Image: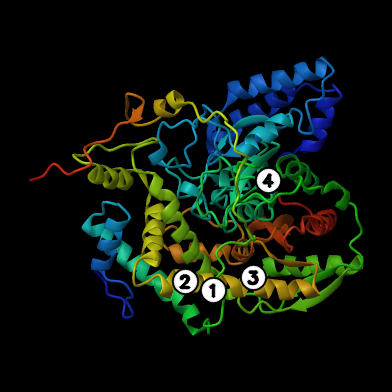
Amino acid sequence: MAELSNAVDIANAVRNGSVSAVAVLDQYLARIDARESSIHAFNLVTREQARSMAAKVDADVKAGRDPGPLAGVPIALKDNMCTRGVPTTCSSRILDGWKPPYDATVVTRLAEAGAVFVGKTNLDEFAMGSSTENSAFGVTYNPHDTSRVSGGSSGGSAAAVAAGFAAASLGSDTGGSIRQPAALCGVVGVKPTYGTVSRYGLVAFASSLDQIGPFTVDVRDAAVLLEAMSGHDPLDSTSIPQPALSLQASLDRDVKGLRIGRITDLPGGSDSEVEARLAESFDALAAAGATIVDVELPSMKYGLTAYYLIAPAEASSNLARYDGVRYGLRVDAADTNAMYMATRAAGFGDEVKRRIMLGTYALSAGYYDAYYGKALKVRRLISDDFARAYQKADVLLTPTSPIVAFPVGAKVDDPLSMYLCDVFTIPTNLAGHPAMSVPFGTGAHGLPVGVQVLAPTLGESVMFQVAAHLERVAPGGAK
Amino acid sequence: MPETPQARISPDAVAKVARLARLDVTPAEVDRLTNQLAGMLEHFADIDALDLGAVEPMTQPYPLVNVMRDDVVKPGLDRDEVLAVAPAAEDGRFRVPPIIGLEG
């Protein structure tokens, strides 16, 4: 794998005029031209838009105006984020031909910070999946081994950074969809606290869980991107009324004296090498003077059940809007009801249909209390478990994924085994907490392993402090 | 259809849910979905063992209050731009097939 430049270095070089944004962009476009056909990270490469954005950054520099902290940084956007006039598909046929009439807030904020958008990345349809195999437009392959998956649902965004097609990218994380592909592709991926990054213009999957976050080549870049896109947005009613996060100061802070929680009843079944990397990450933090404390999260093992009832229930409601009336695809029929049913049958893929069915069932009369109602109570138990654990520990560490990148096709016929990929990431979303994946050595077949750092609500500073240390001491990177 | 011993959902229930969700499904899809949903619901039965009587449901992670924006006039989305990307439009509105069925 090529040495990847980080976003901070690119922005510094562009801002001080030592390189032009157009020249930076050309390097990234050349890598896309060379390898995209074997990776398929993108649904669309926005070449012309990128060139004009880069040219504007260069014009600003020439005129003595500061283009911003992400000056000239090539960034890829998950294709479930609205971009005005640029197709936004969610990797679904049901949005065929649709172009959003507005930009997502994150798109606006990154553009204002000087970013250059190189394209829209592939995902599991409507972000439902853990492998980017459920896309209407084909699989995204792992840049470390193209016979394997990139993870999901933000597989295209993870692969784009790992392959050097973009210096950074955005994903969305509902149950692990940023962190798991980041781990499988050997890059940094952050799911911030629910409400810190505006979701205005993010196509909704499960509204009480969805959160936008960055993929980057290193921890500092992730901090810089989050600083640029976080902070209150009046257009998102779930946005926390507070200023943007301030994270860079915590990166060089000593971890001495921090309390690092080890979950003693962590669900099993991880690869032995994944468990070994996790043990090494605890050792490294202990060696630096942190204290390892044991915590219990007895309800964590029920997270999968709570999530796979709550997320489909919310999805079945959110996806009701795709009815052939306002966006994209319509299959004509004699009356509106027949048109809805034919359009949705033709437009949605199998996994989306499965989750709409599951969610509709869990919400339907006679089953609401037995499924959805119970799941909401389990969600409370998990949140209470975390609250107890964070009285004893500042952060918790787990593997991000129990396994390294698996072969394409290995799990497509067994939805439940696919869902198990998210066992360590889901509880964070249920609680609304931040968590991030940091590359930490390799596992089976020399493939990347990620360690997950979890923190309580708005605990991003200590999370980045620990992540930055793990990055400094991580065993040699993936091949 | 291969019968799971503890099947928690019937093909009839699956067909009914598909109608509620406005999804046309073929008989083969009903069979496949019945099996897959039954398998999942079987797994999800793990929470049946929990005593949840006194637990307060948690609907979302952050304590929210009703959010109102200031009552000032602001431009909305451009109507022509919105209608231009709709499947069908007429006279400044979305055009749909007849709402009432044509049969009978």
Q: Are the residues under badges 3 and 4 in a single subunit? A: yes
Assess disc 2: are there few (<14), some (14-19) or many (≥20) residues with their C-alpha within 10 Å of its C-alpha.
many
Image coordinates for residue A159, horizontal then vertical, percent: 61, 44
Q: Looking at the rendering, in which quadrant would you find the N terminus of chain A? A: top right
Q: Which residue is mark 4?
A: A215
**Type of residue at label 4?**
Phe
The residue marked by circle 4 belongs to what chain? A
Q: Which residue is mark 1?
A: A377
Nearer the N terminus, badge 2 or badge 3? 2
Viewer-proximal residue, A414 or B78?
A: B78
The residue marked by circle 1 belongs to what chain? A
Viewer-proximal residue, A444 or A312?
A: A312
**Type of residue at label 3?**
Ser
The image quadrant of residue B90 is top left
Image coordinates for residue A121, horizontal then vertical, percent: 56, 39
Of labels 2 and 4, the one closer to you:
2
Let me know if residue A456 appears in the view.
yes
Identify the residue at horizontal 40%, vertical 72% (top origin): B41
